[in-house]
Image (tube, grey):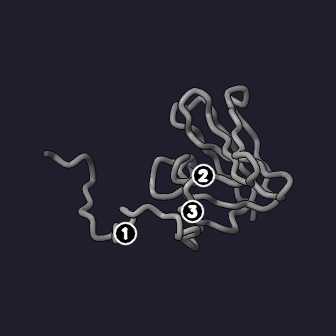
Amino acid sequence: MIHIHTGSCLCGTVKFELEGEFKKFFLCHCSRCRKSSGSAHCANLFAPGAQLTWLKGEDKLSFYRHEDTHFARMFCSVCGSNVPIDAKSRGLVVVPAGCLDTNVDIAPQAHIFINSKSNWDEDLASVPAFEGMPSS
């Protein structure tokens, strides 16, 4: 079975297609992922041997690699949204789950680097939930 996924950035400048299967899905709490996402963690899917095709906006992609580490991000230079990175040296494509426009058939498998998680990232399941912005 061939797995095809599509995705885009927030502003729609960058669009992509991924042919391949997601084998891992991790929620990473390391300080670099927290800083790059502005949230408690990054939600990254890993697709070994996948084929990534840029459908639109390849000329608007920016790349950042943190010096002396494996940490890297590809993002839209217009809106700043994280988009997939083709880690050819590691033989896989890393896809930020939030940029996908298609559903995935894999659930998060682990929280990783939890020793770096924020002090406010505790018992979030007990925080009230709303379908939209709560009224004041």
Asked if residue 107 shows in the view, the reply is no
* Residue 89 horizontal/vertical position (percent): 86, 54
Please give the residue where the numbered disc 3 appears in the rendered image: 28
Q: Secondary structure at mark 1?
A: loop
Q: Tag on residue 96?
A: 2
User: What residue sits 57% from the left and 27% below the top?
Assistant: 78
Amino acid type, label 1:
Glu
User: What residue sits 72% from the left and 50% below the top?
Assistant: 18
* 71 relative to 26 in the view: left or right: right
Q: Residues within 10 Å of mark 3 (few under 14, many from 20)?
A: many
Q: Secondary structure at mark 2?
A: strand
Query: Which quadrant of the view contains residue 90?
Result: bottom right
* Residue 126 horizontal/vertical position (percent): 28, 70
Q: Nearer the viewer, mark 1 or mark 2?
A: 1
Q: Nearer the viewer, mark 3 or mark 2?
A: 3
Please give the residue where the numbered disc 1 appears in the rendered image: 122
Distance from the alpha carbon under mark 1 to that under mark 2 = 23 Å
Amino acid type, label 3:
Cys
Say which label, 3 or 2, has the lower sequence index.
3
